[in-house]
Image: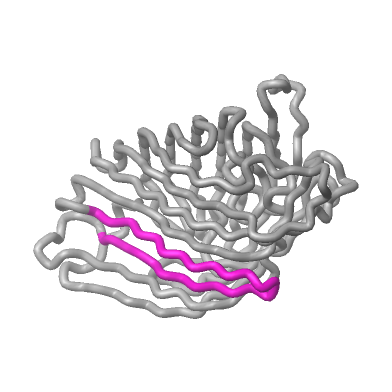
Amino acid sequence: MNAQDTIPKNRIGILPVPSFGYSPETGTYFGAVALFTFQKISDSLSRAGNAKIEFVYTLKKQIILETEWNMPVNSGKHFTKGLIHYSKYPDRYFANNRSIEDFEGYYFLSERFFAETSFLKRVNNHLYGGISFKYVDYAILKDSLPSNINIRNGNATVIGGGPTLVFDSRDHLLTPSKGSYFWFNGGFFSSELNYLKLIVDYRKYFSGRRGNTLSMRLFQEFCTSETPYFDLPRIGGDDITRGIYSGRFFDNNSTVLQLEYRYTIYRRWGIAVFGGGSTLYSRNIEVNKAELYGNAGTGLRFMIDRKGKTNLRLDYAVGSYNNSGFYVAFGESF
C-alpha cells in the first residue's frame, strides 16, 4: 500500500509482460503476468488500485497460478488486499533440518491452494487497521519418504484469521528508497488441531544521494506447537533469506534481520550488497541458545521501468551449511 502511487483520474492501465526468473527452489521459470492499475472516474482523491494475474511454469515441472490485488474503497477510507494461489510441483522435505548430511532432503509431490485477504480501515494517511482471513488446502500427492519419517500434518485444510495493523509510508512498492513499512497480524486457525500464529514485519528505508538506498528488515513469526508443517516459520528463499534454500530450516518461531545497500553506478545500472542473520527456536529451546544462520550476497540492478521505479535484479548469495542461491526477479526482495 502506498499513498503516493496515484494515477490520473480517468486512467485504467493494463500491462501484459513476460515473467521469467530463477531461484534454487524452482530452477528457471517462465510464464506471463498481466498487471492492472485503475481508479474510479468519480474518485480522484484516493490512490490507485492495482492487481496482477500470473502463470508460471518451471523447468522442475512446477506449475504456479496466482492473482493478487490491492484495492482502495470509498475514496480510500477502506482498503482490501489479497492473494489467491494454486501450485502443484515436486518439493523437498528436510527431516533433520539442522544437519548438513540430509541437505538433499526427500522429494514429494504436493498440491496447494490458498486464499487470503485483508479488510482494512484507514486511521490516518499511512495507518490502516482491520482483519485478515486465510484458507489453505495442502495435500501430498506422492512421496519417497522413508517409513520412519512422517511429515507433521502433511495433508491439512486450514481456515482462520485475526486482527491486522498496517503502516506504510514507502515511496514505491517494488523498489522502495525511503519511508517505512510495518505489518502486524495475529490469527487463530482451525485444522485437525487448532493453532495460533503471529507475524511482525518491519522495514525501514534511508535514501541518500544519487538514489542510493540503505534498507533494513526485521521479520518475526511465532506459532504454537500444533501448527501444520506447511505453515511453520522457515527461513530461506528470495523473500526472507537469500542464500539459504527455502524450507531447509524450520521451527515454531523465527527471527530474521536483513540489511541491504543499493548503489547507482551509471544511469539505470546499480549494484547491491546484502546480508544478515536468522534464528529458529521452539518452546524447548531458549532464545539465547538458538542457532544463528548467516547469509550474505551481492547483485546487479537494472531499472527496467523508470516511471514505476522497478528494478530487474540478479542476486547471488551464500548461507550457513554450504547453502547458496542465484535469484532473478523484478523488484527488490524487500
Residue 267 seen from this side: no
Asked whether, in this view, residue 81 is left or right of residue 145, the answer is left
Residue at (26%, 61%) from the top-left corner?
A: 48
Question: Horizontal and vertical percent for residue 160?
Answer: 41, 39
| Res 61 → quadrant | bottom right
Residue at (9%, 63%) from the top-left corner?
A: 42
| Res 70 → quadrant | bottom left
Residue 316, placed above or below residue 157: below
Q: Which residues are magenta?
A: 48-72
Asked whether, in this view, residue 230 is left or right of residue 1, the answer is right
Look at the image and say whether residue 64 sits in the magenta stretch: yes
Residue 206 vs residue 318, the one in the foreground: 318
Residue 204 vs residue 240, the one in the foreground: 240
User: Of all residues shown, which one is farthest toward the front?
Assistant: 147
Question: Horizontal and vertical percent for residue 185?
Answer: 43, 36
Residue 96 vs residue 77, the one in the foreground: 96
Residue 108, placed above or below residue 97: below
